[in-house]
Each structure stands twice: as C-alpha cells, then as structure tokens.
Amino acid sequence: MKKRKYQYFACMALLATFITSCTKEPEINKLSYTDEVGGKVEYLVLSFQNETQLNQKILEIERQEDISAYETNLGYASIGRLSDEFFSTIDFSSFSSENEVIEYMEENKKYIDNETEYDGNISYMPKFFHSRYRYVANKDGIYQVGDSIYRLFNAGTVSTTSNHLNELRSLTDDTLGFLNNSPTFRYVPNHERHYVEAVSGVASLTPTAFSEDGCFALPMDTTFVNTRADMRIYSEFTCLLNIGGGPSIIGIDSYCKMNICFGIWIVVKRNIDYNVNTVYHYREYIGGIGPTAYEDECTEYTYSMYENPENSFHHNKPIAGQQFDYRPNVCTIFWFFHSYDPKWYEIIRFTNINITVHAASVSQTILISNN
C-alpha cells in the first residue's frame, strides 16, 4: 500500500481557488402563494441550479467572518443569520424561573429550537441549529434547487416541486408524521443522535465494522459529549457532498452548551480549538463516474492540524487533508429518491482518529482506532 503525507495548506489553497472561480451566485427567485383571501403573494427564495452550486455556496458561506454583511451584499436574509442574531440578544440572567424560560422560548419559537439532552434535560438553540442549510433558507426555512423546493423543520426536511409551495408552507412539525406515503412530498427526518460520553475527558469508540484493509467508516450518527461543571462540549463528524462534481470535505463540527440553572441548557458562542491527528485510506479519483472512476488501490494518508480558537456557535473543521471528487453513478427512483454508486464512504475510510477539541472550561479527546 502506498503512503503519503498530504499537505493541508496546499489542499485548502486549491479548494479556495476552486470555490472562488467556480461558484456562481444563486438567484433570488420570486415564487407566489395564495393567501387566506385568495390573493397571490410574491414570495422570495434563494434558488440554486443544482446541488453542486448549493453545496459550493454553503462552503463559501462557512468561510465568512461577517455573515450579516455577506447576506446584505447578496440581497437576502437567512433564517440561520436571523435566529443567530436574535439568540445572541437574549439576556438569560433576567429569567427567575424555569417556567419563565420555557414560556419565553415558546413565544419566540420562530427563531428558537429545542431538543432533549441525553440526560433528559432540555436545551435551546438558534433555529435549525444542526442544519448546514440554515444560511441558504429564508425566514420560513425554504430554499430552491432546480424545480424542487425544500423546507427545514425542527425534526427534518421536506421537499416537493415548486408548484406545491402553498401546501409546503402550510405544513407544521406536528403534521410531518403523515407524509410517509405522500405522493407529493418527500420527508427526510433528522438522524437520531447516539451519544458517547467522555470519561475523564476521553471519548473512546470501537468501530462495529471494518473493511478488508482494516478501515472503518465514520460514525456519522454519533455525538461525542463531555460535561464539566456548567459547560458541555459536543462534536459530530460531518461530510459535505457535491453530487456531480466538486470538492467534498470530511470534517468535525463542535459546539458548546451552558447550564443557565433550572436544569436548562443553552447553546453559547465559545472559542474552540482543535488538535487533529488522523490516518485514512483514500481511493484516488482518475476520471469518469461510478466505481471505475477511482483507483482500485488505496493510498494511505496521515493528517495533522492545529486550529486556533474562534468565537462562534458552530465550528466546522476538516479532519482529513484530502478534498475529494465524488462522482458516483446516480440512479433516480421517482422524482425524489437517489441511489449512489459508490457510496462516499467507500472512497475515504479511516484507520485511526485522535482529536482533541478544547474550549476555555471544557474539552474532550476522541479516540477511534482499528486496534
């Protein structure tokens, strides 16, 4: 098996060049819906030609230091930015009881989501906090790709064709369970989080399956968590795919929550830094699409990275120096269901992960190995 040391900065420079040169601006599309009295109302959504353009734009947005200025320059306001700004203005020290917090959050749920913690407590966060599409969705959580429109919900994402905007806008989180057999809508629920607690600051995980070369796929449905006093730090692996070409990046997403008393946790902005050491196998892209577009023999890479802190709700950093072209064969069943060959995790797989994620008062070390 071949071995190489991949240079992170060269990779990121190529990625930045690719994004700058190839990303086209999305359009502000004017759709319309029928209001309560039967009139037509103009409705603005951010519209992308395809998934590649959408995901390239998300990559670009995640590199921005000032999202407010960036969105103003493009002429739109996302639910991600609006809810982040609203959440940052809340004075949590002004609440005197648990009921007061819950009542306030319920009154402002258009900007706030909640979830149940692994220990049964409740936590609050900006709207659609776990979705990377929140910065391309409008105030109702809606964006467009081709002729399909998508809407974010607390529990998942619903898509349909653009002529069903009226029906899409009428949906609520409480009605999503009735969409499983709908010929009009496709409902994709958010994945269930499986928590792994750090013991003495270390979260060790033993993979459940290995490939022939001893590699394992990333546990994408796992959330690593560590609590120290009134602070918690969370980390999840993530993959941004660009179906049809373009860079795909394997990374880790981390965030912090603070206990504000009453057993209630809130997402908080924190400086978080990373010390990443990984070993992974990658099948080089050689051209074309499908399984034959990649070398049969894997190349082994080692990757090390230290990133300085930054103050934000979310921190998304690469855990592999390799950006990779993902160009699978795509089989479409009906208008909404896609099957990809090969799967992205057949292109890049890991043999060793050692990552320390550190905030000011809490940290965790994630250890996953084929040993």
Image: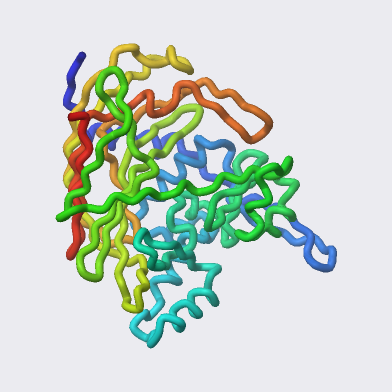
Residue in the foreground of this view, choosing between 178 and 78: 178
Query: Is the C terminus in the top left, top right, bottom left or bottom right quadrant?
Result: top left
Query: Is the N terminus in the top left, top right, bottom left or bottom right quadrant?
Result: top left
- x and y percent of residue 277 in the render? 17, 38
- x and y percent of residue 212 in the render? 29, 17
Left or right of 152 in this view: 277: left
Snapshot quadrant of residue 339: top right
Q: Is residue 174 visible?
A: yes
Against 180, residue 93 (above or below) is below
> At 33% from the left edge and 83% from the top edge, which residue is drawn?
93
Against 91, residue 71 (above or below) is above
| Residue that extends furthest to the left in the rendered view of this protein | 200
- x and y percent of residue 105 in the render? 48, 75
Left or right of 199 in this view: 61: right
Snapshot quadrant of residue 247: top left
Left or right of 277 in this view: 186: right
Left or right of 4 in this view: 38: right
- x and y percent of residue 316 in the render? 32, 48
Q: Is residue 307 visible?
A: no
> At 60% from the left edge and 53% from the top edge, which residue is drawn?
142
